[in-house]
Image (cartoon, grey):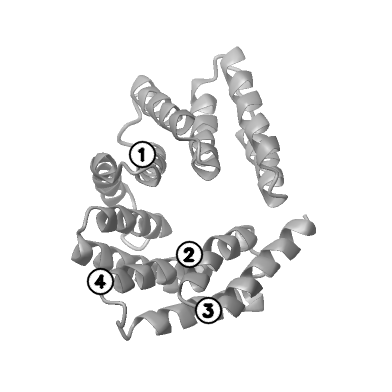
Amino acid sequence: MTKISVYEFIKELDSHFAREDLAGAGECVLKWREKAREIGDRSGELSVLNEMIGYYRRTGEEQPALNAVKEAFDLIDELDIGSEVTAATIYLNGATTMKAFGRSAEAMPYYELTYKIFRSKLPERDPLFAGLYNNMALALQDNGEFDGARECFRRAIDITSSLPRQELETAISCVNLAHLLYDKEPEDAEIMPLLDRASAILRDSAVFGYDNYAFTCRKCAPSFGFFGLFLEEKYLNERADEVYAGS
């Protein structure tokens, strides 16, 4: 059976994101989905749908995002791959999208399903667990489950801190945990050390060349502003601008 080149699709999509060209990214996912459908490549279409979910989450388009989640989940059932890691990563992406649009309670069963699949298929310190813990923590936080959220953030940090090229994920989890602690107790003594740790990572030249460096700077910058660290917020936005301008 003829299949689309998922590699070429991701390469093209990443080239748009590298320039913050969201309009171009949207055209890219629609074009490649149509290509997959035209040749009947259902697994390729699933790969495109997974990226489409993230795209619509990034642009804040709730209904298209939720539609893409449903279509991806239905396609997992059609392909009968619901127990595979590939499916679990899509369940995680879908759950994170539900959470992003205020549906954290609806998302939790899919986080739990993702965890069950990961536990059966992956070593316990696989970086995929860190992504799961970080996103599950945010949903637990929305649901008012402070202790569970804190434990998930700490697990995520523990994993990424021990793995190569996971520094940016550590920074994101530190920032997220700082917000969680602030919501519980604004004077928590752990908040500033977490922000200092994230800042040190984002200012380390070793991470400047990572593909998601600019995105992470942009993602974390408002949090530093929230905590009154305006110079850090300014620095991170300027670093993101520099990277995107050079792409």
**Nearer-N-terminus badge (2/4):** 2
Q: Amino acid at mark 4?
A: Lys
Q: Residue at x 60, y 23 (%)?
A: 3
Q: Amino acid at mark 1?
A: Tyr
Query: Which residue lies under the disc numbered 2?
Result: 169
Q: Secondary structure at mark 2?
A: helix
Q: Amino acid at mark 2?
A: Glu
The location of residue 210, given as percent across then percent down, is 63, 63
Q: Which mark is residue 91?
A: 1
Q: Are marks 1 and 2 in contact (CB under 8 Å)?
A: no
**Nearer-N-terminus badge (1/3):** 1
**Nearer-N-terminus badge (4/1):** 1
**Nearer-N-terminus badge (2/3):** 2
Q: Look at the picture and state if 193 lies above or below 90.
A: below
Q: Secondary structure at mark 3?
A: loop
Query: Which residue lies under the disc numbered 4?
Result: 184
